[in-house]
Image (cartoon, rainbow, N blue to C red):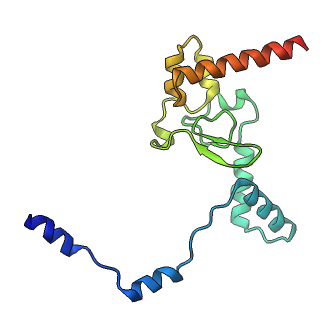
Amino acid sequence: MNGMNEAKEELPLLKSEDAAELDERRRSKTMSRKEMARDLRRRRLQGQVDPEEESVLNEIETNRPKTRADCIASPRPCMFVSCKHNLYLDVNPETGSIKLNFPDKEIWELPYTCALDVAEKGGITLEEVGEIMNLTRERIRQVETRGLLKLREATDK
């Protein structure tokens, strides 16, 4: 019991002047992908883009794979998390919101980071796909059924 009392005594308490200081700090702002793109376009039109930022964006764009042949031999985990085939996160094209598929893992902890790598593996069970994509076997079955329906509709047209 004495150990618990000692631990409580070691914790600093906020004083009224500390609370006022917390209120004066700037809070972080979350921007959607669309807002960031709009801001970058505005700054480019006004000639206000930081040269270092511009060089990083150009390097990313030049190194980004354009075809499967470009990315098949690239190192894994894939660093292009904005690619539509990347399994680490999903970007909603309508809203620009980002969803982490594996909130409890870092990208380098994933056995697969590219859906195309999983597809090339071929012949795996729903359980294996569910484990790779952090979904249940039933959800994988539903997605598979929906995809097959879309393919049938496309071939019928």
Is 33 above or below relative to 29?
above
| Direction right: furthest residue | 157
The number of numbered badges drawn on the structure is 0
Location of residue 19 in the rendering, given as x and y in whole percent from the top left corner: 43, 82
Image quarter hosting the N terminus: bottom left
Q: Is residue 40 above or below residue 150?
A: below
Q: Is residue 81 left or right of residue 156?
A: left
Q: Residue at x 57, y 10 (%)?
A: 123
What's the residue at 78%, 19% (across, down)?
Answer: 150
| Image quarter of residue 142 | top right
Say which of 57 and 116 sits in front.
116
Which quadrant does the C terminus fall into? top right
Q: Is residue 85 above or below residue 117?
A: below
Residue 118 percent location from the top left of the image: 59, 22
Left or right of 85? Residue 48 is right
Q: Name which residue lies at 83% across and 66% down.
A: 42
Judge whether 79 appears above or below 35 on screen: above
In x, y percent, where is residue 144?
A: 65, 18
